Amino acid sequence: MATARGIATTAMFLLIALSASHMASSLRPGVRLGTCRASGYLPGRSGNCEKSNDPDCCEDGKRYPQYHCSPPVTASTKAVLTLNSFEKGKDGGGPSECDNAYHSDEEKVVALSTGWFSNMARCGHRIKISINGNSVYAKVVDECDSVHGCDDEHNFEPPCDNNIVDASPAVWDALGLDQNLGMVDITWSEE
């Protein structure tokens, strides 16, 4: 038969074990209990930021969060849709990472935050983007870099947040969205 002292000792042991486990998981950079936290900060550096789609441009001395992870992908992943031109010389910066090419604003293409881009694993995949009962399919062609930025390659824009679907004007038009908004809450899923 268990004694009160035995039960108290067992309870104390479990409490200590759970606390140690929680502390260990909270010390891992980036990911903790299904969330994604900043893994560092990038010092801002301003430059020649092309402003055709009203991007946020880096400011000297400002610190920008960096993310190696993104929230978990589900059947209806919450995200922020942003506007981006994938054409040469526009605010998208260099050619798309998946195919080393530029894409017309008439193409339904997107870039995903670093964690969702998953080291090019989603290149060429179609994703379904939904808002207000409307949906459109778009092809993943690029990474919305959540780690690097504030340089010429990234149009002197800060790193993307960890929950971005950066979409061409054709995607915005297909969803019936006002491009002047620049960002809206959406959900997306893999096809």
Image: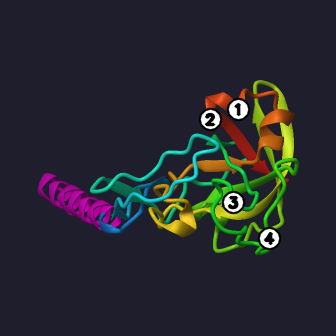
Report which residue position mark 1 lands on. 179
Q: First in sequence: mark 3 or mark 2?
A: 3
Please identify the quadrant where the N terminus is shown. bottom left
Q: Residues within 10 Å of mark 1 (few under 14, many from 20)?
A: some
Up/down of 114 relative to 11, above or below:
below
Type of residue at label 2?
Gly
Residue depicted at 70% across the width and 39% down the height:
187
Name the residue nearer the viewer: 138 or 74.
Answer: 138
Q: CA distance from mark 2 to mark 1?
A: 6 Å
Q: Which x, y percent locates residue 22?
A: 31, 60
Does residue 119 appear to the left or right of 26 in the view shown? right
Query: Nearer the N terminus, badge 4 or badge 2?
Result: 4
Label 3: few (<14), some (14–19) or many (≥20) C-alpha neighbours in 10 Å: some
Nearer to the camera, 19 or 106: 106
Q: Residue at x 80, y 74 (%)?
A: 99
The span picked out in magenta is 1-26
Q: Amino acid at mark 1?
A: Gln
Q: Name the residue carrying label 3.
A: 89
Q: Disc 4 to disc 2, how far (Cα)?
A: 24 Å
Q: Which residue is painted at 52% across and 54% down in the image?
A: 49
CA gap, disc 1 to disc 3? 19 Å
Q: Amino acid at mark 3?
A: Gly
Mark 4 crowd level (few <14, some 14–19, many ≥20, 10 Å Cα): some
Secondary element type, mark 4: loop
Q: Which residue is mark 4?
A: 101
* Residue assigned mark 2: 182
Q: Are marks 2 and 1 in contact (CB under 8 Å)?
A: yes
N-terminal of the pair, mark 3 or mark 4, is: 3
Report x, y in % for residue 35. Answer: 46, 52
